Image: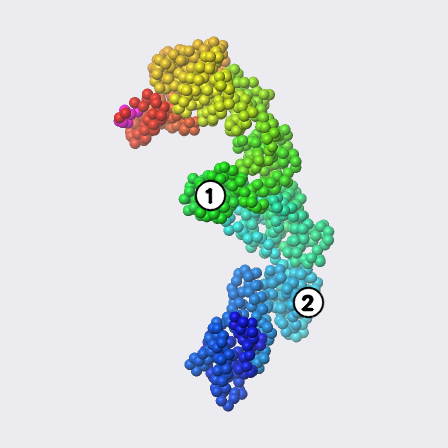
Amino acid sequence: MVELRVLGAVEVVAGGTRLDVGPARQRDVLAVLMLDAGRAVPADRLVDRVWGERPPRQPKNSLYAYVSRLRSLLGALDGVTIERERDGYVLVADPLLVDVHRFEHLVRRAKATADDHAALALYDEALSLWRGTPLSELDSPWVHGVRRELERKHETAVLDRDDLRLRTGGHAAVLARPAPDGASGERAAAQRIEALFLDGRPADALREYEAVRARLADELGADPGPRLRGVHERILAGGGPEPRQLPAAASSFSGRAVELAALDRMLAPDGAVAVVTGAGGLGKTWLAVRWATDHASRFPDGQLYVDLRGFDPAHEPVPAERAVRGFLGALGVAAASIPPEPDGQGALYRSLTARRRLLVVLDNARDTRHVTPLLPGGSSCSVLVTSRHELGGLLTTHGASALPLRTLDEDQARELLAHKLGAARLADEPEAAREILDRCGGLALALAIVAARVAVQPGRRLAALAAELRESRLDALDTGELTASLRAVFDASVRSLSPAAASAFRLLGLVPAGDIGRAAATALLGDARTLRALCAASLLEEHLPGRFRMHDLVKLYAAELLDPATRLAATTRLFDHYLSGAAAAMDLFSPHEPYLRPPPPGPGPSFANAREARAWLDAERATMLALATTAPETLAGHVVRLSATLWRYLYVGAHHHEALTLHTAASAVAGPGTRERGFEAHAVGKALIFLGRFDEAASQLDEALALAVAQRNDVLESMARNSIATIADFRGNRPAAREQYDLALAAARRTGHALLEGIALCNIGEHHRWCGDHQKALEYLHRSGRIAEDLDSAGLGAPVLAALGSAYAGLGHEEKADEHFRRALEFARAGGNTNLEVTALNDLAATKSGVEAISLYGKVLELARRSGHLRERAVAHRGLGLAHLGVGESAEARRHLEAALAAYGELRAPEVEEIRELLGTPA
């Protein structure tokens, strides 16, 4: 490597060896050419620069001799030569081989660099090229002028570098330089005074300032300039350096616009304290750093930041005392000047911050005690805290505002994943992307882990990752690193709990559905007081008054921590609670059918009325069904009892899909040939009827009837025959239906249960109405109605009213029909009888025409779709088709009639032929 040097003695170095470049005048010639490397220097100018006013007698001959010898010297070097150009000479070489040109190049780069640390490194490299006085062995008027200019550039670069050192905490390096003398100027003096102040030596800084001020007054009769005065004012005001401690904001930050706006409001006034709380992995730090970065200009005195590691998987929490000492250092207090006692450190910290406009970001705080010593003094600083704990003490005693952070909604989660992976990647595999989003549950860390895995394996299909998440979400989201693994993040939160709260956390992992009520939690845990502690730790959320939920991923982790024996005992307690509660609720919801329900394991809650009981059933339905479908074999009896207990509720509420799931699970574990198996076969068959799966239903009902007859179980026989008759009626087989209805009535009377007899009479009345014998229908329906009145049973009375409305409509008694339909719908809606509401609306709509019929059928369609009631959906589509035909809307009519044809075809119902005729479609 070749080096051409002028920043010291004029030298040529090749491969580390310094070459002999000849006598002084020859070195002068070389220096002139090196300073103008790459540019031609006329011979006259060369002579003038080398000899000045005392040239030799034949200067050009002497010049030629020097150039000739230099050419010989440089000829052996690679890429360096001297060439003749017009009336002069040029040093042909990369200018950056010449130290002065490289110095100026590096200084230019440093000035153009926005990164202070990078600029500092460039200045260090540039100044390292100086080896002493430039052109040190040469002596001419021209050399003296060049030397003065180069030394001026060197001094400017040194001062520029020291400004950077002061901005980046390198004041010790400034102090390590010799103290500037009187000729060094105000800038160097100001730098040294500022460095003394930043080093925690304000008294020394003031003494030096006074010395400089006096010297300026004595020697120049002038006052200190703006920079010196500014430093002096900072010292007097107690100000120190302006810390800029915020970490870089994540480039992938997206969404959270609502939360950022909330922080704008919370931190608008001076002295405000805002607390961002929420579970681990939600993105609290992202949010806090993004807001702080975006609003840094509001805090001209700087931003302090500390990660307190309150819930760090790999480290113990940072003690508040250590954080205070770190802040004191950032504020310019020398280590030797920090008081030894924590109280003294805190007092000094508050004093230094009392008159400043600072933002203090306390990230990942453990609890209120972790935060309190770090609150600044005065009312001009703002504080932004993040924690997994809700920090109630800080809210209460320091007037802090709380921003509970929730999971990202679907759009925000998709935006975040698209930002990391690209929208095109998600569009290529929409189903897999949707499943990934669903299984990450809006947890920012989970989405980030997914994105990282894709980045590491860019060729991996999203479908493969979705399959991993489907098999084991926590395994798929385990990075193997403590700081970026969901299990580790959750574990850090659990380790902060008391033993009782940690035990409760593990048990709540057993809750199979979205949430749990306080009473159920008490049954599961034995004591509900730990719920509050879990909510405070952001591991549990009271999303509705008295109802608690865990994030799915948190719940999976909690469940992993349970041992099998504890799991079984706790699941049994929870199941017993729900069985007892369901039995108590059903005693009010369907008080005349106790014979259908097994005895509960214990007393249940007290309900004020049937409406309150129904509300409890609605709230707990999902949890009870999930518990039954995930129960271990040892709790098979519980599953069967829950199925029997909830049968009427699920039927009346038109929860047909859920009914099928529960009853199928119970049927699978009920003993073959038992009463329970017979009941479950009927329950499964009944659900299948409403879902339009008549063939499957018939098979189940045949099994139920066979068991009923064999066991002389008249209750089950009546129920099974009623259901078998319903299928026959729907398929137009009236004789078979009537035979089964009559046998069902006979069996009901043998039971002695009046309600069962009333149901059979109502069914026979409906059958006669379908057959067109409305008068006969009235006879049976009135008999059924009298039983409903005797029992004060709205559950029977409401269906009778609806059936009477249809019968009166068939007889042309429109006012009577409307009145009965109105009363039936009132009962249905008050009791939550969705099944009856769908049927009654369909029957009422059939008595109307035009716009009124269209409106009623539209309501039916909505309810039928929600409940999965295929036959009522078919009836509604047929009715809408006819109603639209009646008002001349043929296209809309055809759409509904085609839907009716598909539904009736699936049911194998006789109405298919009628619909085909209306559509003009051949069979």
Question: What residue is rendered at 52% in x and 29% in y?
Answer: 630
Among the 4 quarters of the image, the one containing residue 146: bottom right
Does residue 65 show up magenta in the picture? Answer: no
Pointer 1: what residue? 414
336 left or right, relative to 310: right
The image shows a total of numbered marks equal to 2
Report the amino acid beneath label 1.
Answer: Arg
Q: Percent from the top left, x then y, of residue 62?
A: 50, 86
Among the 4 quarters of the image, the one containing residue 394: top right
Pointer 2: what residue? 208
Q: Of helix, strand and loop, which one carries label 2?
A: helix
Residue 767, label in figure:
none
As measured in the structure, the alpha-carbon distance from the residue carrying label 1 to the one carrying label 2 is 60 Å
What's the magenta region?
915-921
Q: Nearer the viewer, residue 645 or 207?
A: 645
Does residue 918 show up magenta in the picture? Answer: yes
| Depicted 486 relative to depicted 59: above or below | above
Question: What residue is rendered at 32% in x and 21% in y?
Answer: 910
Q: Percent from the top left, x then y, of residue 446?
A: 52, 43
Question: What residue is rendered at 56% in x and 53% in y?
Answer: 296
Residue 303 visible, this orientation: yes
Question: What residue is rendered at 65% in x and 37% in y?
Answer: 498
Tell me, yes or no, whether the two marked residues, 1 and 2, touch with CB atoms within 8 Å: no
Report the amino acid beneath label 2.
Answer: Glu
525 left or right, relative to 734: right
